[in-house]
Amino acid sequence: MSRRTKKGLFWVALILLIILAARAAGCSLPLFLSRRDHLTDILEQMFPPDWGYFPRILAPLWATVQMSVTGTVLGAFLALLTAPLCAGDLRTPRWLRPPLRVAVQVLRSFPALILALTAAFLFGLGVFAGTAAITAYTFAIMTRLTYDDIETASTSAYEALTAMGAGPYRAFFRAVLPDIAPAYLSNALYMLETNVRHSAILGYVGAGGLGLILNEKVSWREYDRVGAILLALFAAVCLIEAVSTYLTAVITGRRRVSRRCRRALMAGFGLLFLFCAAATAPPDLSRTSVQTVKNMLGGLVRPDWSFFFDTGPGGLGRLLLETVCIALAGTAAGALVALPLALLGTARLMPRPVAAFFRFVVMAVRSVPFLIYGLIFIRVTGPGPFTGVLTIAVCSVGLITKRFTEAIDGLDFRASHALAAMGVGPVLRVRYALLPQLGPAFGSAALYRFDVNIREASVLGLVGAGGIGAPLIFAMNQYAWDQAGAIAIGLVLLVLIIDVISARLRRAG
Amino acid sequence: MVLEVSGVSKAYGGVHALEGVSFGLEKGQFVSVIGPSGAGKTTLIRILNGSETSDGGQVVLDGAHMELARGRDKRALQKRIGTIYQDFALVDGVSALQNVLNAALPDMAFGPAVLGLFGRERREKAARLLERVGLSDKLDTPVRDLSGGQKQRVAIARALMRDPALLLADEPVASLDPVTGRQILELMQDIQRTEGLTVLMNSHNLALSQAFSDRLIGLNAGRVVYDGPVDRAGEDVIAAIYGEAPR
């Protein structure tokens, strides 16, 4: 089979798969259109927000920022220590590698919300549990990203140093770290941005921060106050994004600053972290006992196998399949919306004000926690997987648009100019010289988001939007650890399978 | 005469890149334009292939005035010129064959061009050209996976795809190692001799220009300071072109 036919077959198969997934998740455009008036139901109640409520938002908002800063820094730091032990080509103890990799992979399979729920069982309700969850979440993702980076970095300097007798850790910090530092730091800053949004909903499971009052106001239907909370969150997200964009530019060398300024930035960030960490309330261990921990681990060791292998409608297999369908259809819909937004949001193709406007829109869409979208869509399409698809789609738009815009900003116009000199018109230049450059970047952005969405889709159950989330959270709240264990194992396996598939797709290009 | 250039000038913000440049090219000649950095060599190539317009003067290709042509007419003239570049200017992510086929786009109707229906004839021709430049086993390889020399071979095949009257080469070997660079020039010379192609090459490598060209044009500060056979360009002429003796 030639490369062209293979490519064609791949696309046909992918589109068929997405259509099947959408049908399985109960997606129905007519239903959505017929009830589209309800889309603005809640929005109308949210605006104008209750301005008088703002002063009372500040404390939980601070707790949210505190959790994300402390958790991100701690998690990223632990990841930096662990990644060299996981990487293949450094001379670190070989026997440590497989168990560490498995641990990271298992941790990576769970969304922040589930980690927070677990942490709340261990450390009691409050900010400490949230911080612990964000730390674990950041640690898992950053370790994986960093050891991938280490494995692709050049090791010649590292080998030279170890040949001169330097120990593996010392050689790593001297020879490999400078190479991967820019990628590591910009990943960490990106994690900080996402973590602010994540920690804003952790309060749903009792882990402190904005989520606590968000949950309260949503259940009391005080939507004008919900509007105020969302606005405050949006301001915080904008601020963090602005800071992180500036710092990323400094780190990658796009913006030059003096040495003194660099030091001042580092000291400032260090102080912020210390302040956030020091202000974290200690854990409430009064209700934690060795027995709780034993019960939780017992569930993982002795899961409910009959539920695990149940292939009926309420069984694990069906629920996981539904989760995959929601993630697949949602990612596809999100990518479809993201494409025009990315084209409109780049200053390279659009006038500056237009680009700035669309970037602002995308940022606003991104700053709202997904549970709020779930609540909005449930009014339109009712409880069920279709609501999950819509929620996942809207949540995907932000990240995919961001990656798409980056790809467009990085376009190489030389080939296009060469075709122009041969007399090729503008449309054909885009088709033959520019789109081939964007294809792989678009593909990998969508694939990456699909990976994230599998996890996100597994907590949609919290708002009744289908998937594996609801059963997992119910099981945990009822201390049915054997069922929770079965679901956890299923989720880990699912994420592992998706990982293998997406790695193969990436390699195939 | 394939190409006649007379009195071509170009200025960027008051700085003269070219001033009253005139010369002619006979069919089948291999001519090198030499000169120090900033002498206007690349500007000259960009004006000749229509990427840039001159401020004054005439460029006549096979009797048609390039500087007067606009839109469709200009594109028709551009079809008769092939250009290769220092940085190859290929689409990295697609195959060598597709890169060569891209040169056929201006000859095709819009629909088939967008859909990529190039037809068997064009595909065979592109494959034949890739074979001609020594890449018969790399047709389906993405350009990204080719070496620098192989990329320049693909670029040459692309330039030849439409049987150009004139091949322009803007520092074609400056990004390549000496051995590979020599092989590329040997290939260009071979094509020039067997197919009677006219070649105009920019180069800052004096030794290679002397070895492969029939004729040298020396540019200094936008003016032609020498135009004649290679063997008559002695050390004094070279010194005048570069403003000082080349190192």
Image (tube, coloured by chain):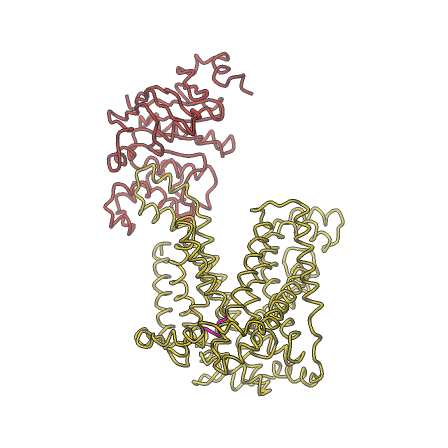
* Nearer to us in this view, A442 or A160: A442
* Nearer to us in this view, A216 or A48: A48
Hey, which residue is sitting farthest front in the picture?
A52
When the figure is inspected, residue A342 is found, relative to residue A277, above or below; the finding is above
In this picture, residue A332 sits left or right of residue A301: left
Q: To which quarter of the image does residue A301 belong? A: bottom right
Hey, which residue is sitting farthest right in the picture?
A165
Q: Position of residue B213 (x, y in %)?
A: 41, 21
Q: Which residue does the image show at 57% across and 79% down from the upper left?
A: A205
Q: Which residue does the image show at 45% across and 65% down from the upper left?
A: A365
What chain is colored yellow? A
Q: Is residue B211 visible?
A: no
Q: Position of residue A273 (x, y in %)?
A: 67, 62
Q: Is residue B42 visible?
A: yes
What shade does chain B have?
A: red
Q: To which quarter of the image does residue B78 belong? A: top left
When the figure is inspected, residue B165 is found, relative to residue A281, above or below; the finding is above
In this picture, residue A168 sits left or right of residue B17: right
Q: Position of residue B83 (x, y in %)?
A: 37, 33
Q: Position of residue A356 (x, y in %)?
A: 44, 54
Q: Which residues are magenta?
A: A369-373
